[in-house]
Amino acid sequence: MVSPRADHAEGEPGAGAVGRDGCGGPGTHRHGRPSPLPSPFPSPLSVDRAFAGMLDSEEHYAQQVLHISQSLFRGPPRSPEFTVADEHAEQPEHPERLRHTGGPGSADPVARLAGEIVDHRFKGLPPNAAGLTVGALAAQRRSLFTGGFTTPVLTLAAGALEHNLRQLGAFAARHGLAFAPHGKTSMSPRLFRRQLDHGAWGITVAVPSQVRVCRAFGVRRVFVANEVVDAAALRWISAELVADPEAAVVCYADSVRGVELMDAALAPATGASPSPRPLDVVVELGVTGGRTGVRTAGEAVRVARAVAEAASLRLVGVAGYEGEVPDADAGRVRAWLEELVALAAGLDAAGLFAALGPGEEIVVSAGGSAWFDVVAEVFGRVPELSRPVLKLLRSGAYISHDDGHYRRATPFNRVPGQGSLLPAFRLWAQVVSRPEPHLAFLNAGKRDTSYDLGLPQPVTVRTAGGAERAAEGMEVVKLADQHAFVRLAPGTELEVGDWVALGLSHPCTVFDRWQLIPVAEADGTVTDFVRTFF
């Protein structure tokens, strides 16, 4: 793995840099992160002694992981340090990061997206824009409502997008976290670029095809939050690492069998010229009743051993997803995160990260969009290990937020002083039928919106004359493929032809229904477009 901070050798601020100029100074590590408070944890020597010889007994190892977890995190949990002045602090833009993702100009694959031709592939765009490039259409700054856009049409609010990008970037920096937002949410290279420009360490994905999108658009660091056992995909990743010495790909392992498959797929490349780089792997910790990941410390050490012994792999850390903890609440999530940190400490004390070079970092990663406050709290108490620790947050849905599931689940509800997120999606649909007094139909349905974590709900009504009002007395109660069933309270005014803006729930199953999404200002002026690749 390329040293996670190696790309800052010329003085570039790190993804977790604190301060507007990103520079070090009193109270900062050489990586630009805040120096820790006096440690409440056992010394590295005491941890070393606690784990000495444990690999001879996996049962003993599991008991010792529990012991270390309890010793590392004794005492009441501490909230991350925060001051009110930090709430509105701006995140450095890091324009120099553009060179790491292609940079501006004709050779930049993200910039080239503006040259794509508008045609029938893209829902909701003006028919009379066919033949224009995306960039030319954006330059016309058409009105969403009078510029020829057709319904249904999904939009992203420009102001909300920028707000959300800044908020999570600032949150991660404030708490000394590196940030690899989950790209499977949007699968948009343009949004990846903006996330990187706001200080992200890299981009997280779930499957090999998403790695290919990232690499095609110049993303250097890709974190695969899954075990990759597809031989063709593994050989392609290996070729990418050979072709680009600055590329870094990290993936999960949660079974010895998976490690064997990875090593076998990459073994044919052994002896090739140039010599292949090993694939960086983190052991995934799961939870009983949850999703993937090892269930016990004993399993974790078996997998870690297998990775460390594989010629084509390299053990670089531990990771997992706290969102799959059954009956999750702050206490259960905190306890799971403490187990994750204890696992990292145990594997380190056992010498299993020996393949990391000088200055390289042990990866400890977690964090969806519902518990990043608890992740920050626990990761803020990671003990000193034999090497620096890359504390990597992977939230994804924050970028567009929503009006449903994540509006209720965001950690900023619990810690409002630390930030806020705004819903960026609006799905504009048109009333096409009023067949009964208390029923209306919109021309948007399952083909256009998410419905797995709640139905869309009316937010705004816009009449044919351009007047807007709150969508009171209306509720979407059912979706068909191309229709939304809207129940109306008695006396609710709604005419055939009116436009209705719908607030949505669960961004991950909204983006994938739209290939090209208009980005609109508050007055409806469309100034940009977001291209997706699912």
Image (cartoon, rainbow, N blue to C red):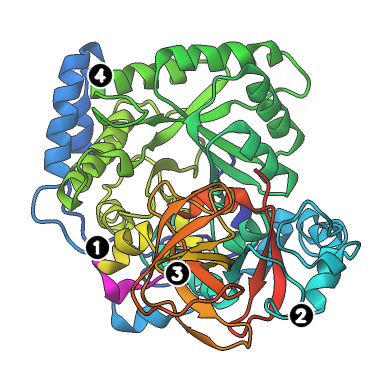
Comes first in the chain, label 1 or label 2:
1
Disc 3: which residue? 458
Residue 436, labelled with which disc? none
Image coords of residue 478 (percent x, y): 42, 52
- Give the number of the mark in front: 1 or 4: 4
- Give the number of the mark in front: 4 or 3: 3
Disc 1: which residue? 37
Label 1, label 4: how many angstroms apart (C-alpha)? 32 Å
Q: Are marks 4 and 3 in contact (CB under 8 Å)?
A: no
Disc 4: which residue? 298
Image coords of residue 81 (percent x, y): 26, 69
Label 2: state its secondary structure.
Answer: loop
The kind of residue tagged 2 is: Arg
Split into 4 quadrants, where in the image is the C terminus?
A: top right
Q: Are marks 1 and 4 in contact (CB under 8 Å)?
A: no
Disc 2: which residue? 141
Comes first in the chain, label 3 or label 1:
1
Q: Is residue 71 above or below residue 78?
A: above
Query: For the magenta stretch, what is the residue range?
Result: 414-424
Label 4, label 3: how many angstroms apart (C-alpha)? 51 Å
Residue in the image at 47% along x and 51% along y:
479
